[in-house]
Image (spheres, coloured by chain):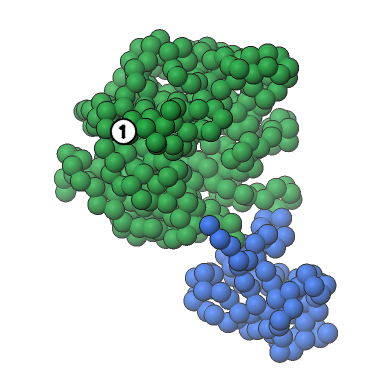
Chain colours: A blue, B green
Amino acid sequence: MTRDATITILVPAALRACCGGASELPLSAPSVHAVLEELEKTYPSLYRSICDETGKVRRHVNLFVNTSHVRDRQGLDTALAPGDVITILPAVSGG
Amino acid sequence: MPERVILSIGTKKGLFVADAPKTRGSFALRGPFGPGVGVYATLIDTRGKPRLYASSCNPFFGMKVLLSTDLGKSFKETKSAPAFPKEDGRALINIWSLEAGDNKKDLWCGVEPASLFRSDDCGDSWEMVSGISNHEHARKWQPGNGGLCLHTILRDGKRMHLGISTGGHYMSEDGGRSFKASNKGIGAGFQPDPYPEFGQCVHKIVSHKDAPGRLYIQNHGGWAEWDGPGGPRPDIGVLRSDDYGRSWRSIAKGLPSDFGFPIVVHPHDPDTIYVVPLVPMTRTCPDGAPAVWRSENGGDSWKRLARGFSKKESYFTVLRDAMDIDELKSPALYFGTTTGQLWIGRDGGEKWDCLFDSLPPIHCVKVAVV
């Protein structure tokens, strides 16, 4: 773990309007939780689309660090290393 | 520009807008806006330059409020949507009601879990109204099948009436600062006490500017055959108040069922009201034969209006906000169905035609002449 890991966030098409159309956002943060805190400051609309007002990740939003779902690692406490990629994906749905 | 009739139609898959000349002969449809996302509330704000609002209730990414300033040709999100304060501990699940406030930029918004928000800048920022959102009853309200929603906001000067399912009718006489439950005469079929202080499943409340103090409710009826604790509760479904909502009495006599969701009042006659009775168990049209029922004497008697509807094999539901009436001299009613049909009832509901028959399931319908 590093205090200033430079990571990349992959933004799904449905949320790119929240960050000026960007599909990728570079960020320096030591954990997934810190990433969300940074997004709350820099892209509040994107943050609100990922987390509800209590700070919980929305039920149907999945966060991956590289290919691992954060729930299979240490949740929002998952540490990040330089070069990690965080992917934001909506859950699959039907109907 | 000649006046046009605008319909704002909230569906399971986004918002549609239809418009027609005042003759209402043919409606042109556009949309969906906010495609793929359910819309449970819409408002055509005709104060000043018309504005169309719609909730966009995204189960993935949260609630948004959509705004159009070009009569529904395009929409954009407002800068924010209602949200509970972080320390509150609740999170917004749905937006059920959008209503105009006093000033041109003022809006009110009812949400799930049942709470009220207010905006003074056309929906760009919102403030929770604590008088009802933190009411001493709030944590005791229970969700119905549709969720725990604040779905009706009626205003009359300093008076405000709210409909909550399931919470009942709450009223304010100080402009929305404080609220009290006011459910005397409003029954509940799903509680041991047939007439509790609060907790009723009110479906919709309407009023008329020319009849101060009078209100009509479509409540959750259908308990005439109930044989559980407290016994049968006939006729608790359609009610009227003549004292600003302090007490209520049944006006369901003559209807085939006192269960239904919407209730609408005629724009030029406070004695004329419309309901859509449904079979309580299935929430569909009795005998598969749709009908709107009209009273022209404030609920003393009812007439079945079914000219143009199928006489059989039609089993749709009309939800609480899915019926409205325009304000033309001879007004037309409009309702949307859970099967995606949009119907118009010209001449006050005397003759019905299906305008669109294959939309997504319809949650809400609003009409305005602009």
Q: Residue at x 29, y 53 (%)?
A: B29
Q: Which residue is mark 1?
A: B309
Residue type pointed to by label 1: Phe
Q: Toward the viewer: A77 or B174?
A: A77
Query: With respect to residue B9, does A42 lie above or below?
Result: below
Res. A44 in view: no
Q: Residue at x 37, y 15 (%)?
A: B302
Q: Most extreme residue toward the top, as rendered? A: B300
State which quadrant residue A75 falls in.
bottom right
**Is residue A55 left or right of B337 when viewed as pictured?**
right
Q: Toward the viewer: B188 or B87?
A: B188
Q: Position of residue B157 (x, y in %)?
A: 46, 26
Query: With respect to residue A60, does B98 lie above or below?
Result: above
Res. B95 in view: yes
State which quadrant residue B364 falls in.
top left
Q: Position of residue B142 (x, y in %)?
A: 69, 34
**Label 1 CA crowd tier, 10 Å (few <14, some 14–19, many 20+):** some
Q: Residue at x 51, y 74 (%)?
A: A13
Q: Chain of mark 1?
A: B
Q: Position of residue B185 (x, y in %)?
A: 59, 14
**Is residue B314 left or right of B368 when viewed as pictured?**
right
Total numbered labels: 1
